[in-house]
Image: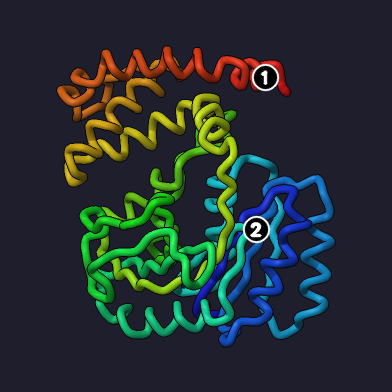
C-alpha cells in the first residue's frame, strides 16, 4: 500500500501521458500509486500505460477503463481503487516537479496530525519560479473559503486531500452531461475542513489563452444542469456576499438554459429573486454570443 494516490483522468491523451509518466518516474519519493482512469479513450492509451508499467517496475501504476462520461465521472470512478491515505491530481497534459511527492508527504506528516486539516494546497505554475497564484497566510491551518488567492491567471492550485474526504463527497452526475465544475464536490471539503497553503510550485502546467473562455462558456451552456448545480453550491451563506451574488446570477442563467425551476428546494429565495432579471438577461446574451458553437453542438459537430 502507498501513502499517496495520484489520480490522472484521461481521454484520448496517449500522446501527452508520456510526459506525465516521466515526471513521476523521476520522483525523489516513490511512495505513491499512480491511478489512471481512462474515460473511454479510443486511442492507444491502454497500450501506452502498459508500456509505462513494463518500463518502470519500481512504480505502482494502476489503469482502469470506463465508458466516457467526463472528468468528474472519472474522478468518481476512482474511489474504490485508491490505495493512499491522501490523494493528489495530475492532469494528463501536465507534470509534477521531481520533488512533488516528497513535498506532499512531508507536509501531510507535519500538518496531518491536526484532524481539522483536510487539505494541503501547493501551487501550480508555468515554471517553478512563476506561480499562477499564491496566498499570504502560508503554513497555517485556515478557512480556505476566506483565504484570498492572489494571482493574475485565476485561483488554480495543486490541491491534495485526505482520501476519506475526497471519497465522502462525490461529484453529482446528470444524465447526458459530461462536464461540471470541480467546485461542486471540492467545495464540500472546504466547508467541512481547514486547509494549509504552501507557497511552493510543485505542479507545472501550460494554459492556452486563445479561445478558452469562449469554448469553455459554450461547453458550460451545453451542460447547463451541472453549471446550475455548481452555481447553487456557491450561493452558500458562508461565502462572501459578492461571490454569492455573482453565483446567483449564474444560477438563474443556467437554470433558464436547463429549463429547470428556480425556487424549489432553494433556501436562497431572496438572493435568487434579486438575480432574476440579470440572470435571465445573461442567459439571452450567452445564447446570442455563442449561437454558432451551440448550433454546432446540437448538430453533433
> SS class of the residue under badge 1?
helix
Q: Quadrant of residue 111?
A: bottom left
For the C terminus, the quadrant is: top right
**Rendering coords of residue 141 (x, y %):** 23, 71
Disc number for residue 92: 2
Q: Residue at x 39, y 56 (%)?
A: 168
Is any atom of residue 251 visible in this view? yes
Asked whether, in this view, residue 27 is left or right of residue 181, the answer is right
Q: Residue at x 46, y 33 (%)?
A: 226
The earlier-in-sequence mark between 1 and 2 is: 2
Q: Residue at x 29, y 66 (%)?
A: 195
**Rendering coords of residue 101 (x, y %):** 52, 78
> Which of the two residues, 26 or 115, is positioned nearer the viewer here?
26
**Residue 188 versus residue 143 in the image, above or below:** above
Q: Quadrant of residue 189?
A: bottom left
Give me the C-alpha separation between circle 1 and circle 2.
27 Å
**Rendering coords of residue 60 (x, y %):** 66, 77
**Residue 73 versus residue 216 in the image, above or below:** below
Q: Is disc 2 surrounded by few (<14), some (14 to 19) or many (20+) residues within 10 Å? A: many
Q: Which residue is mark 1?
A: 296
Asked whether, in this view, residue 117 is left or right of residue 25, the answer is left
**Residue 253 versus residue 147 in the image, above or below:** above
**Rendering coords of residue 210 (x, y %):** 59, 39
Count of numbered labels shown in the rendering: 2
Asked whether, in this view, residue 146 is left or right of residue 216, the answer is left
Q: Is disc 1 surrounded by few (<14), some (14 to 19) or many (20+) residues within 10 Å? A: few
Amino acid at each position: 500500500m502507498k501513502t499517496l494516490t495520484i489520480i490522472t483522468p484521461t481521454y484520448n491523451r496517449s500522446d501527452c501521458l508520456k510526459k506525465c509518466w516521466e515526471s513521476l518516474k523521476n520522483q525523489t519519493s516513490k511512495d505513491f500509486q499512480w491511478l489512471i482512469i481512462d474515460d473511454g479513450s479510443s486511442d492507444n492509451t491502454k497500450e501506452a500505460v502498459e508500456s509505462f508499467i513494463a518500463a518502470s517496475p519500481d512504480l505502482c501504476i494502476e489503469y482502469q477503463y470506463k465508458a466516457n462520461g467526463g472528468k468528474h465521472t472519472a474522478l468518481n470512478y476512482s474511489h474504490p481503487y485508491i490505495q493512499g491515505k491522501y490523494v493528489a491530481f495530475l492532469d494528463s497534459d501536465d507534470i509534477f516537479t521531481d520533488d512533488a511527492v516528497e513535498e506532499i508527504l512531508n507536509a501531510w506528516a507535519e500538518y496531518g496530525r491536526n484532524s481539522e486539516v483536510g487539505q494541503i494546497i501547493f501551487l501550480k505554475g508555468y515554471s517553478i519560479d512563476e506561480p499562477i497564484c499564491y496566498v499570504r497566510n502560508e503554513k497555517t491551518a485556515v478557512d480556505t473559503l476566506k483565504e484570498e488567492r492572489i494571482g493574475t491567471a485565476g485561483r488554480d492550485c495543486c490541491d491534495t486531500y485526505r482520501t476519506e474526504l475526497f471519497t465522502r463527497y462525490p461529484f453529482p452526475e446528470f444524465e447526458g452531461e459530461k462536464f461540471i465544475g470541480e467546485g461542486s464536490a471540492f467545495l464540500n471539503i472546504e466547508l467541512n475542513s481547514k486547509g494549509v497553503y504552501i507557497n511552493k510550485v510543485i505542479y507545472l502546467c501550460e494554459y492556452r489563452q486563445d479561445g478558452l473562455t469562449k469554448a469553455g462558456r459554450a461547453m458550460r451552456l451545453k451542460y447547463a444542469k451541472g453549471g446550475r448545480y455548481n452555481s447553487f453550491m456557491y450561493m452558500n451563506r458562508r461565502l462572501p456576499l459578492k461571490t454569492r451574488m455573482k453565483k446567483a446570477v449564474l444560477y438563474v442563467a443556467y437554470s433558464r438554459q436547463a429549463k429547470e425551476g428556480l425556487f424549489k428546494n432553494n433556501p436562497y429565495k431572496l438572493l435568487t429573486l434579486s438575480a432574476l432579471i440579470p440572470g435571465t438577461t445573461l442567459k439571452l446574451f450567452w445564447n446570442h454570443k455563442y449561437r454558432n458553437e451551440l448550433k454546432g453542438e446540437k448538430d453533433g459537430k
